[in-house]
Image (cartoon, rainbow, N blue to C red):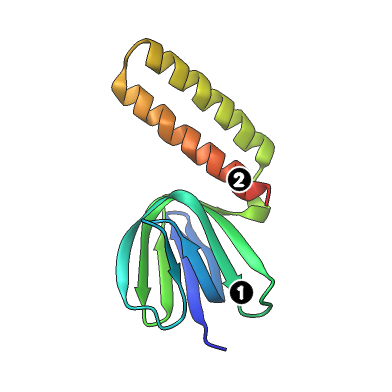
Amino acid sequence: MAQMTVQVVTPDGLKYDHHASFIHAVTKEIGILPGHINLIAPLEVDELKVRRVDDESHVDWIAVNGGIIEVKDDFITIVADSAERERDIDVSRAERAKQRAERDLEEATKSDRIDEVQRAQVALRRALNRISVGTK
């Protein structure tokens, strides 16, 4: 079976390192199979789906908060501001972050502070992403 190596790196170090048969990442949405052409692309705040080679039904989910993906000769490197595997996400903490972001967004919208609206929108997107991955 063809395979590729996937590594997810954050400023805190290596967060993920496995062999995969398929990866789904959201840039402008791409799917990656072994032998994919080399590329570098920006990542959205979204989930990363990694189908492992050790078991075709084994899928790892990772919440990635932006960054870049590099595909080079069946070696995939994802450099992200932060990333958490499904098993490491504290969903109740993510729910509290979501509630804070929603309050911040509402307050910023009322006062017409564009920069604070944008920050709250990003915080909300990150919290929702963590909740989505954490409840897989």
In this rendering, would 30 be left or right of 93? left
Label 2: which residue?
132
Q: Which label was assigned to residue 133?
A: none
Task: Measure the alpha-carbon separation of dots 1 and 2.
Answer: 20 Å
Can see residue 51?
yes
Q: Residue, x 56% and y 74% (percent of image)?
A: 18
Label 1 sits on a secondary structure element that is: strand
Residue 107 percent location from the top left of the image: 44, 14
Q: Residue, x 49% and y 40% (percent of image)?
A: 126
Residue 42 percent location from the top left of the image: 33, 56
Q: With respect to residue 66, does 93 lie above or below?
A: above
107, 36: nearer the viewer: 36
Label pair 1/2, CB-CB below 8 angstroms? no
Residue 12 percent location from the top left of the image: 47, 54
- Which residue type carries mark 1? Arg
- In this view, the residue farthest toward the bottom is 1
Label 1: which residue?
52
Label 2 sits on a secondary structure element that is: helix
Q: With respect to residue 124, does 105 lie above or below?
A: above
In this rendering, would 29 be left or right of 130? left
Q: Residues within 10 Å of mark 2 (few under 14, many from 20)?
A: some
